[in-house]
């Protein structure tokens, strides 16, 4: 409950809370000082004479502080909330810069006008700044030490009944939110995200300029090019039957800028792709920080861009740690360790190849797989802390929901005290075998006694123990103490491997797995097998699921890395042909010689490119490459992918012509602004950081797009519709 600053006033019993901090100066990007805000408002004196006061405001709602007490001010904004208590009327007035409490009582001339005010009306208030005392102060609000006594109130604009509330953070249907986006944007969290987005873009622009880059603008209407997605086409009225394409990226233009003799280009570039929406990309359009540099290597690009991206994250991370030295992980290594080329390094799980432990083992599923297929591998996905049958069964059920037959596992637990004691006795007897025949006989008798007692859960016979002991002796005599210790741990140690796979492969192989993976009692490991090209994505998803379920992922940090050495080509299974893997304008490692010496599809698929991605917390936030700057390599690379010289000349005529007139070695990249903002705002989807997004069906519910074209427009464009039949 809230009390007024004046004596005798009681807190209004409205929701039991003080006025909220919606649209605070921090949310709007202000520092809380009065200098923030529009000229003629925050910059004017709060107690300026009436003749000189601005028509709408002398100060913004978020700028008032205790030092302003006694001043007469003019404020304009939206009615955030009206609270009526004991005859006193409180109006929380909100603008872009913050919120301030205004108050009137029945004796005030403005009281009747204040009584009529409703949520989201736009009003103007003239009043005097008063200090709030004691527990009436709201420490959670920058203006919480003051309030404004309303002297005059004018209604500038009324609001109809709201289709969705602005006060608070209600969970409202998304279609309603998008249709009335202008209201949705008034909510504190969304307003704050949009302001933060603009601050991030400004920071990027400033850092690029400080690094010596020049900002250029490239055309929006251009030619279609094969860049991995469908183009948005724009019909030409002047050239019937021909179409422009909206740029999927300014790829060719930024290279042409380098060829034109400019050195360091950047642009906050809009990009357009007609593709299905997903969590980290909106339908239709997105924005990227686009860069290109001349006379540089891959390392030069990294050196130029790491400080920019790191600096932006550190500036807006709210104190969360940010990677200082970005690791460089080869594409093949990323797939093998994390199952993806977009690894979330906050997850400590690293997968390993454990094929040799299953080759020729008693677990026939994996053993047979390895015997039949030379490409087959068995990957282990460690699960520290997941060593319970309940968790393992839950993961197995999850795998089946993903369309997999299951998820094999082993988990370790400490042997029961009774079993440990008996095995210690066996182990002690076995050590006597290092002596002569007498000690060996004594050990044999002791082991026979244990076997005859049918010791619970001792899963090996006296003969097996004697055999193990002999092997231990042989290793010790040969100076191979590590192997002797391994056998001792496998059979006489404290870790007990459990699960169907453990029973099939035996103690030694289970212990070898545990040792390689660095696991202990209370841990587990899951397995994926087959051709890694077919199962690595599932293995990566399992790694993510395990890390999340076991709370292994540190959510309060930003882990950045480079993924390098991407394949230059990939196999298009649908078309049964070689296709570009990443960017058709990139340089293959080894340049022309590498393309000419590749004699088979296997050779071509083994080629690497100077291509790279920057990844943060499991999201690709940037992608780039060293460019192909010679026509010979361009023709050869496209020819291998099935594009003849005539096609290349037709599709990329401007680029090819430019390359024939002295092109410098150049390289670049593009960082996804939307994804960076989403990460720094902690948003779950891109609609929470975008001003006017489309919905999941690629519809703009606010403006009614896409819409039908009129018959006149279609005639002017020489277009006749051939629509699919409605079912």
Image: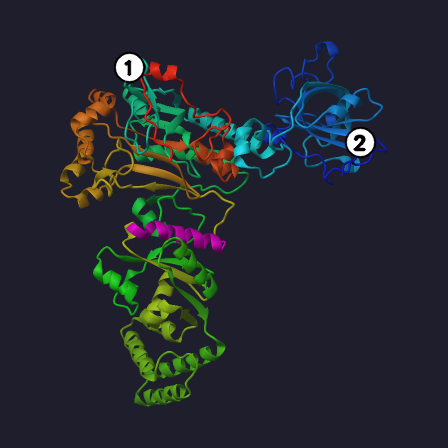
Disc 1 to disc 2, C-alpha distance:
72 Å
For the point 36% across and 51% down, the residue is 538
The structure's colour scheme is rainbow
Q: Which residue is mark 2?
A: 5
Q: Secondary structure at mark 1?
A: loop
Q: Quadrant of residue 671?
A: top left
Q: Which residue is mark 1?
A: 239
Q: How far across and how far down the image is residue 703, in percent?
A: 49, 24
Q: Is residue 115 left or right of residue 595?
A: right
Residue 611 appears in the picture as rendered: yes
Residue 589 appears in the picture as rendered: no
Q: Quadrant of residue 54?
A: top right
Residue 538 located within the stretch drawn in magenta: yes
Segment colored magenta:
534-551
Q: How far across and how far down the image is residue 551, in percent?
A: 50, 54
Q: Secondary structure at mark 2?
A: loop
For the point 52% across and 42% down, the residue is 320
Residue 292 located within the stretch drawn in magenta: no
In primary-sequence order, the first of circles 1 and 2 is 2
Give whichever of 568, 205 is nearer the camera. 568
Secondary structure mostly taken by the magenta-highlighted segment of the chain = helix
Rendered image: mark on residue 84:
none
Whether residue 457 is situated above or below residue 167 in the rendered picture: below
Whether residue 322 is situated above or below residue 205 in the rendered picture: below
Q: Around disc 2, counting alpha carbons within 10 Å, would you say few (fewer than 14), some (14 to 19), or many (20 or more)?
A: many
Task: Give the position of the C terminus as an image quadrant.
Answer: top left
């Amino acid at each position: 409950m809230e009390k007024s600053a004046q004596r005798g006033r009681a807190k209004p019993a409205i929701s039991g809370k003080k006025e909220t901090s919606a649209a605070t100066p921090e949310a709007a990007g202000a520092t809380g000082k009065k200098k923030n805000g529009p000229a003629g408002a925050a910059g004017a004196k709060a107690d300026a004479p009436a003749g000189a006061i601005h028509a709408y405001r002398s100060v913004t709602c978020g700028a008032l502080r205790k030092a302003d007490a006694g001043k007469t001010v003019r404020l304009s904004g939206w009615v955030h909330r009206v609270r009526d208590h004991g005859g006193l009327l409180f109006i929380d007035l909100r603008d872009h810069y913050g919120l301030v409490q205004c108050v009137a009582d029945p004796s005030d001339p403005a009281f009747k006008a204040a009584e009529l005010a409703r949520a989201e009306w736009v009003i103007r208030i003239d009043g005097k700044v008063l200090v709030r005392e004691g527990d009436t102060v709201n420490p959670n609000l920058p203006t919480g030490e003051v309030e404004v006594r309303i002297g005059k109130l004018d209604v500038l604009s009324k609001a109809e009944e709201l289709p969705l509330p602005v006060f608070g953070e209600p969970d409202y249907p998304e279609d309603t939110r998008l249709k009335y986006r202008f209201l949705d944007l008034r909510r504190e969290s969304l307003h704050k995200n949009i302001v933060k987005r603009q601050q991030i873009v400004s920071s990027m622009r400033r850092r690029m300029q400080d690094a010596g880059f020049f900002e250029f603008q490239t055309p929006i209407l251009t030619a279609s090019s094969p860049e991995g997605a469908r183009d948005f086409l724009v019909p030409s009225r002047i050239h019937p039957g021909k179409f422009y394409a909206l740029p999927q990226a300014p790829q060719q233009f930024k290279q042409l800028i380098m060829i034109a003799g400019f050195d360091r280009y950047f642009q906050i570039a809009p990009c357009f792709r007609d593709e299905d929406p997903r969590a980290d990309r909106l339908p239709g359009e997105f924005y990227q920080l686009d860069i290109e540099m001349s006379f540089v290597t891959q390392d030069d690009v990294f050196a130029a861009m790491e400080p920019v991206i790191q600096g932006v994250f550190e500036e807006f991370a709210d104190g969360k740690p940010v990677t200082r030295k970005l690791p460089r992980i080869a594409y093949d290594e990323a797939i093998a360790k994390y199952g993806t080329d977009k690894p979330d390094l906050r997850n400590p799980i690293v997968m390993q190849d454990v094929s040799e432990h299953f080759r020729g083992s008693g677990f026939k599923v994996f053993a047979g797989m390895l015997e039949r297929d030379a490409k087959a591998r068995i990957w282990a996905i460690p699960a520290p802390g997941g060593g319970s049958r309940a968790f393992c069964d839950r993961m197995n059920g999850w795998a089946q929901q993903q369309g997999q037959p299951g998820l094999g596992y082993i988990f370790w637990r400490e042997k029961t005290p009774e079993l440990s004691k008996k095995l210690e006795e066996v182990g002690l007897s076995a050590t006597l075998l290092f002596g002569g025949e007498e000690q060996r006989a004594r050990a044999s008798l002791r082991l026979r006694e244990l076997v005859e007692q049918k010791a619970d859960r001792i899963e090996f016979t006296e003969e097996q123990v004697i055999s193990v002991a002999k092997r231990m002796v042989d290793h010790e005599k040969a100076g191979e103490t590590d192997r002797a210790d391994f056998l001792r741990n496998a059979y006489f140690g404290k870790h007990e491997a459990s699960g169907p796979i453990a029973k099939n492969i035996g103690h030694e192989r289970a212990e070898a797995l545990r040792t390689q993976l660095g696991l202990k009692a209370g841990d587990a490991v899951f397995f994926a097998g087959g051709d890694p090209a077919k199962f690595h994505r599932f293995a990566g998803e399992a790694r993510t699921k395990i890390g999340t379920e076991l709370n292994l992922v540190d959510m309060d940090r930003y882990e950045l890395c480079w993924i390098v050495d991407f394949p230059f080509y990939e196999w298009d299974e649908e078309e049964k042909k070689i296709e570009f893997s990443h960017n058709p304008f990139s340089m293959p490692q080894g340049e022309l010689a590498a393309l000419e010496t590749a004699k088979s599809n296997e050779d071509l698929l083994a080629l690497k490119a100077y291509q790279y991605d920057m990844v943060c917390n499991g999201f690709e936030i940037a992608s780039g490459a060293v460019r192909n700057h010679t026509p010979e390599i361009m023709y050869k690379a496209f020819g291998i992918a099935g594009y003849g010289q005539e096609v290349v000349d037709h599709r990329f005529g401007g680029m090819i012509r430019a390359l024939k007139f002295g092109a410098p070695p150049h390289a670049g990249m593009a960082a996804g602004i939307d994804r960076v903002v989403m990460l720094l705002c902690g948003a779950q989807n891109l609609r929470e950081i975008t001003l006017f997004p489309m919905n999941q069906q690629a519809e703009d519910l606010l403006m009614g797009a896409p819409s039908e074209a009129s018959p006149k427009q279609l005639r002017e464009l020489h277009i006749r519709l051939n629509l699919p039949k409605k079912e």
